[in-house]
Image (cartoon, grey):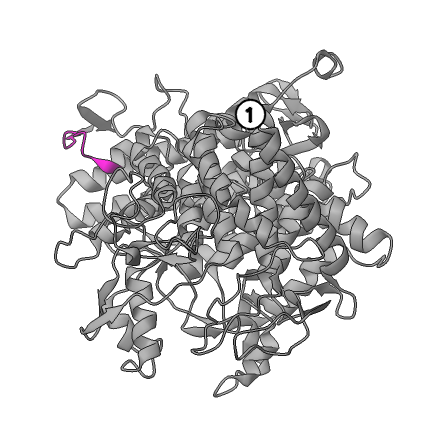
Amino acid sequence: MKARAGYFKEGDVTKEILGVGYTDVPTDPKILNGVDPHEFIISAEWTFGAINMCQTIAVQYRALAKATINRTLQTTYIRYAESLETDAKTMLSGVECLLLDTSRNDRNIYAYYYANRRYYIPFGWYANRVDSLCSTSWSLMVENSFNPFILGGEYSAQVIDPDVYTITSRTFSLPPKSKEDKMYSFFQAGVPAIQQKLVNFLIVNNTTNLGDPPSAFNTGLPLSFYARKSYWITPPNNQKTPNSKNAITERCLAHYGADIYDVATAQCALSIFPELAEGMSVASGQTKRLLSSFSMPNVTYPTVTLSRPTASTIRGWTDVKKKGDNTSAGAYFFRMIADQYKLTDPLLGGAHKWSDWKPITGENAWAAFIGPLQTAYSENKGIPPLESDAVQLGLKVLPAYQAMVSPGGGIYYAPWNTSANKAGTFVDPFMISNENNFSSYAGLTMLEQVLAKGGDQENLAIVTNLLEGIENYFSTCLFDEKKNHFFTQGSYNKLKGVKKKPTNTIGPFIGGGDFAVDVHTWGCSVLGVEKVDSWFGTNQYPKLSVYSLWQTVKLKAGYFEDGDTSKKILGVGYTDVKSLKKLTPPIPKDKRHKYIISAEWTFGAINMCRVIADQYNEQSSPYYNPLWARSMREDADSMLQGVTKLMLDKESRSDDTEAFYYTNRRYYIPFGWYGNKIDSLCSTAWGIMVFNHFNPFVLGGGNGKRMPMAISHPMRPLLHLRNLQLDIKDISEN
């Protein structure tokens, strides 16, 4: 079928299949007019039908592999399934890129063309490049793993009979399904087969499954990482001085700790599948955990305060005169939390104590706003009520945000007296992190939408004022006109470097910091083309655009095929690769663009490219540029292929989990922490979001207030179409 009717990348049947046509590819030169036969005709409807077939048959082959005890057959069936899943994935990417009509984005209307060109189909009718009802319907079915040929739409391994599976002339009895069969429940909840092990990692990578002796302190807190003990001492990624205090601290934080940002990304990813009870329990459980303000074991997380040991707090005191009160509105949460205070070094043994007590703005934006509100939106199938846990949690940190506003409107990085990464030093209290402010802008925007819908005018005024201040800060302090990209951070502090507890020495804002990839990818995802290109491009800097910023990011921090910047980009690192010359030994220039790749930041870059491509592809926009849109979509596609190939751990913590590594090697990230090639909660969560075209910076993963046209991708029907409103003119004119 592929060989006869496939539509292939560059027309080359040895490369990825992007779709199918109707029959044998045309060979008449008069018809082809110079176009390669296998790049001439693609049908959206029939391609989606082919994707459905590939996904259906892949499920059945995997069921056969599970049922047979013949190792050879098992290997063969798994190989067949993986091949079909790969074809389904590349065709889905291809048909979206080639046949999605976003020309009516201003009215929230998307459709798929019938075919890519006018073409006489040998079966008796013309195909045209016009919006098609059946093509669009098929796309929604495929995106939601709905098989129209089975009542109820299930991608079932049992097609013919509830108890028997038939293929050709042979019949195999399948093992009986049980309610405890997790993978089956994932199918029922609509989790695509190729994502099930990733989703399961988010669910099971928690303190209950640490592998330590049973402890009353294991509450099921999701963990940021999973690392085998041998990792820390196995070259080339081993710690150089594993007995040092810093090395022990790093291991303990990785083994027992949860960065609240990481868990918030897991909340976002799990909210994509509201029918998956196991996942939604994890997501809503984190909201309840933070709402209680303590990490002590209690599955219902009741509001019990002073009766608990103060060491179990996960946020600062809300009343410094009454230590122990941390349940009322006021303080930030600490960036990392654990459900144990007394720890055992996972490598060497020996007693250790939890030692990370840093209340950071960015982590709080994700943990108090973005993650919980996305979860609540999914649970409520729309805007959550004011009395919901998520809204109450957001209001709980609102006073802290008010207290952290800088003179220019931006939100400070951390409160006074917050310890810095280096022992004996403190964070500059007048410093502003732009990444943190982008997260805050997105999270506060979500809260603003909820408060407006619920009619809470008092808190709405507070949130709106905060948002307007952040916008003012962005428009005046974000752009480094000398280097033609965004500042990473800045400070109002007159002092250079804070080695002691700082004093009140506030001065004018000065931007700076090492170049940061996520400041640009997250920033452009949140602000969008309209703000960036108008604030910094059209008026003051006519050559600046989101597109040009992306080209800067690629050249400074891209991870390229063969390390060659003229070839495909496969991902991004963290900062300018020139910094690699400072390593010991220094990394040669020709190897810097294939040295470090971050799965998390690459997925963030893919999300940005998709968001911005949609905006540049909007014909009614003054920023319409289809060439830039196509280029950014191509970069998104090549990065998705690259990060999946390079960073997916198929041998994760168990045979029913997969995860994405944090980085491709052990590497000291210049912003203050080590990246390790270990399974990462946030990398995996970001991967799931990207696979499902879910933009975490917008409530519901689709379009939203304050972020014009900031749509990750229209193919989030269950979430995006909830807010779709049609006027009579939309129907009558089209």
* Relative vertical location of residue 408 with respect to residue 66 in this rendering, above or below: below
Q: Secondary structure at mark 1?
A: helix
Q: Residue at x 41, y 30 (%)?
A: 145
The residue segment tinted magenta is: 171-182
Q: Which residue type carries mark 1?
A: Gly
Depth check: give the residue in front, 714 or 510.
510
Name the quadrant containing residue 93.
Answer: top right
Would you say the magenta stretch is mainly helix, strand or loop? loop
From this viewpoint, is residue 143 visible? yes
From this viewpoint, is residue 40 visible? no
Depth check: give the residue in front, 287 or 555.
287
* Relative vertical location of residue 96 with respect to residue 683 in this rendering, above or below: above
Depth check: give the residue in front, 91 or 308.
308
Depth check: give the residue in front, 80 or 331.
331
* Relative vertical location of residue 710 with respect to residue 16 in this rendering, above or below: above
Q: Residue at x 67, y 32 (%)?
A: 101
Q: Is residue 150 left or right of residue 720?
A: left
Q: Position of residue 456 (x, y in %)?
A: 57, 28
* Relative vertical location of residue 495 with respect to residue 707 in this rendering, above or below: below
- For the C terminus, the image quarter is top right
Q: Residue at x 66, y 27 (%)?
A: 108
Q: Residue at x 29, y 67 (%)?
A: 252
Look at the image and say whether residue 172 sits in the magenta stretch. Answer: yes
Q: Position of residue 650 (x, y in %)?
A: 32, 55
Q: Position of residue 97 (x, y in %)?
A: 61, 41
Residue neighbourhood size for the residue with mark 1, other residues' Cα within 10 Å, grouped as few (<14), some (14–19), many (≥20): some
Task: Return the residue at label 1.
Answer: 454
